Image (spheres, grey):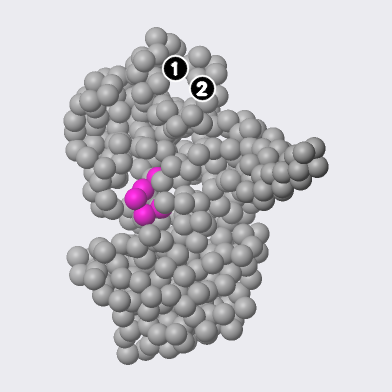
Amino acid sequence: MRTLLSRLTALSTVAALAFGLGAASPEPQDHQQRRRDVQTGVQVLMADRYATLRGQKVGVITNPTGVLPDLSHEVDVMARSDEVDLVAVFGPEHGFRGTAQAGGSEGYYKDEQTGLPVYDTYLKSGQALADIFTRSGVDTILFDIQDAGTRFYTYVWTMFDSMVAAAMAGKRFVVLDRPNPIMSERAYGPVMTPEFATFVGREAISQAHGMTVGELARLFNAEFLPRHGSGKKVDLAVVEMRGWRRGMPYEETGLPWVPPSPNMPTVDTAVVYPGTGMFEGTNLSEGRGTTRPFELVGAPYVDHRWGAELNALRLPGVRFRQAYFTPTFSKHVGKVCGGVQVYVTDRDRFDPIRTGVAMLVTAKRLYPADFQWRYDSNDPARPYWIDKLTGSPRVRADIDAGKSPDEVAAGWAAQLRAFADLRAKHLIYRGGRR
């Protein structure tokens, strides 16, 4: 009987270890220890009992990502607190509660859970946005939205427009910092040029900026705000994170990933987005309307050759799977698309923008009769969406001229070096994962 019990115990131990049910090995224990280190700006603010907001009427610009580690939303927590006077919420694209798709918002309403007024700020800037801040009665505006690390991901420009409007309205602006989930150790890609300023890029930063929203706010205030609105800097404070370091993978922060928009469901999406997001400027589907947006890319005219060509390039840190998908909305809805799924095998070696350029170059070369740049008939002076996304006509012109991916990347090198020098002045956090 004892022998049988011993065997059963041994078997149950093996099964528990195999299925992750038993005691953690030393490596997972160390990983779990690391996962407890990072506190976001809102956690630091609450731990300090809202000291920096005492005596002020507060409004917050946020969305579903404004959560605490237990997944409670900061607005719901603050609304119940006697230590902070929260009087308004400001909703960006997709809305405060996140009910709207790309290009939409929730409008003005009273939040059912808290009773707070929610003002719609999407596509509002300048005096119109300053008037909303004035009408709300706030003294201080908090900003707390999880960014995705890419210039054409618009929440950083919501922050920029709000900083300009806050300066115009004489309001204080406080950024509650959160991690950059991707490539935070350096900047990547082309730098926007002023004549191509839009809501997917107001100012000259690189395509993957490698900064937190708090660091960007410092850069915006020092370098760009004096050229906008009232010509003044805003009264800015950044509530810094504790325990976060440059280059730390998001999964090691211990923080939950809440999709900042409907088509940014995972950290994996954010990792590839600086590159595959450029396909929004083409007639290929960037995977909207699938379960893997920005990881799946293709079109009805694409066949097996594209994936084979891309794998033959042996790009660092990435492989491509031949894939077929049928988008349920957006481009090519209801049509079978051939294409690839992007698999990042080594994030440290993966360059999403260099990879995205290689994908564009090979797609245009393989399918010259079908590949097209997406055309914006409402903007005849800047008609190509890819130019807005990359910040100038250079990338498109180089690809059209038949240049290699390396030659295309060489075209932005000087501008990127200049931005890297500017960026360095405004960094808060040190590098190194530990």
Q: Nearer the viewer, residue 388 or 340?
A: 340
Looking at the rendered structure, the kind of residue marked 1 is Leu
Looking at the rendered structure, the kind of residue marked 2 is Leu
Q: Nearer the viewer, residue 382 or 243?
A: 243
Horizontally, is 358 left or right of 392 in the view? right
Are there few (<14), some (14-19), or many (20+) residues within 10 Å of tag 2?
A: some
Q: Position of residue 172 (x, y in %)?
A: 40, 25
Q: Quadrant of the N terminus?
A: top right
* 257 in the magenta segment: no
Please, is residue 57 above or below residue 306 in the view?
Answer: above
The secondary structure making up most of the magenta span is loop
Q: Quadrant of the C terminus?
A: top right
Residue in the picture at 23% in, 25% down: 112
* 262 in the magenta segment: yes
Q: Which residue does the numbered mark 2 point to in the structure image?
A: 45
Q: Which image quadrant for residue 386? A: bottom left
Regarding residue 346, the answer to whether it shows in the image is yes
In this picture, which residue range is highlighted in magenta? Answer: 260-264
Q: Earlier in the sequence, mark 1 or mark 2?
A: 2
Q: Position of residue 102 (x, y in %)?
A: 28, 53
Q: Nearer the viewer, residue 288 or 290?
A: 290
Q: Are marks 1 and 2 in contact (CB under 8 Å)?
A: yes
Secondary element type, mark 1: helix
Please, is residue 377 above or below residue 18 in the view?
Answer: below
Regarding residue 236, the answer to whether it shows in the image is no
Residue in the picture at 28% in, 21% down: 114
Q: Position of residue 356 (x, y in %)?
A: 49, 70
Q: Which image quadrant for residue 196? A: bottom left
Q: Which image quadrant for residue 215? A: top right
Q: Which residue does the numbered mark 1 point to in the structure image?
A: 53
Please, is residue 277 above or below residue 374 in the view?
Answer: above
